[in-house]
Image (tube, rainbow, N blue to C red):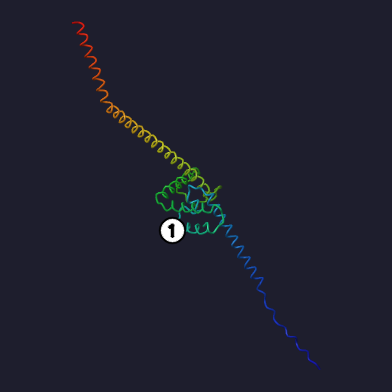
Amino acid sequence: MYKSTPSSSKALPVSTTGEADLAEIDKLLQRETAALQREAEVERILKAFKLNPYDILDIDESSTPEEIKKRYKQLSLFIHPDKTSHARAPEAFDLIKKAESELSDEPMRQNLDAVIAQSRSLILKSLSLPLSTPNTDPALRRLDPTFKVRMRTQTKELLIEEELRRRKAVKMNLANEGLEARMKEEEITSKKRKAEDDKVWEDTREQRVDSWRNFSNTKTKKKKSKVALLG
C-alpha cells in the first residue's frame, strides 16, 4: 500500500517591484507639489503690496526681529531662484530681501508701525469702538470683511498717501535744486562775461589812448589854424 506524500511547495518570493514603483511615484508627486508651492509663493510675493514689508514677508506686525529674520530665511530658501523655475523668482527674491532689510531698520519699522497704529485708530473710530479694544473682542471678530482685511486696506491707503507726499517733496526738492543750479549757472555766466568784457577793455586800452591822442592833436591843430586865420 502506497502512502501519498504531500507535495513539497516552495514559498513564492514577495515582489517588491510594485512597492518601489509606488515609492518613486510618491517622490515625484512630492517634488511636483513642492514646485507648485514654490511657484505659488513667488506669485504671492509679487502680488503683495510693495510698500508694506509685512505683506511681502506675510508676517504679523507684532513679530520680533528674530522672528522676522527666521521668516526671511525660510522664504529665501524656499523660493531661491536655484530651486524654482519661475521666471520672476529673482524678482521675488529681491523683494523679500528688501522687506527684511526695511524691517531690520529701526527708524523705518517705527514709521511703518506708526502708520499701522493710525490705521487701527481710524477703523476703531469708524466702528465707534474704544481705541483700547483688543483684537480678540467679539465685535471685531464678527466683522465682514474681517478686521485684518480692513487693517491691511486702511494701511495700504495711508502708505500710498505717504508715498505720494514723499515723491512730491522729492520733486519739489529737485525743482528747487534745478532752480538753484540755473541761478548759479547764470551767475557764473555773468561773471565770465564781465571778465571777458574787462579783458577786451584792457586789451583795447592803448588803442583808445591813441585814438584820444589823435583826436586831441586834431583838435589842437584846428584851434591853431583858426587863430592864424583870425590874426
Q: Is residue 159 left or right of residue 216?
A: right
What residue sits 43% from the left and 56% below the top?
65
Nearer the observer, 216 or 131:
216
Q: Is residue 230 left or right of residue 100?
A: left
Q: List x then y, in percent, for residue 15.
A: 67, 74
Question: Can see residue 139?
Answer: no
Q: Is residue 213 left or right of residue 156?
A: left
Report the amino acid beneath label 1. Answer: Glu
Looking at the image, which residue sits at the far right?
Answer: 1
For label 1, the SS is helix
Q: List x then y, in percent, for residue 24.
A: 62, 67
Looking at the image, which residue sits at the far left?
Answer: 231
Looking at the image, which residue sits at the far bottom?
Answer: 1
Nearer the observer, 206 or 53:
206
Q: List x then y, in percent, for residue 33.
A: 59, 60
Vertical side of 31 occupied by 3: above or below: below
Vertical side of 3 occupied by 187: above or below: above
Tag 1: Cα neighbours inside 10 Å, few (<14), some, or many (≥20)? few
What residue sits 45% from the left and 57% below the top?
69
What residue sits 59% from the left and 62% below the top?
31
Q: Quadrant of residue 27?
A: bottom right
Q: Quadrant of residue 34?
A: bottom right
Nearer the observer, 25 or 109:
25
The residue that label 1 is drawn on is 66
Q: Is residue 51 left or right of residue 39?
A: left
Question: Can see residue 115?
Answer: yes
Q: List x then y, in percent, for residue 90.
A: 51, 53
Tally the numbered discs. 1
Nearer the observer, 150 or 162:
162
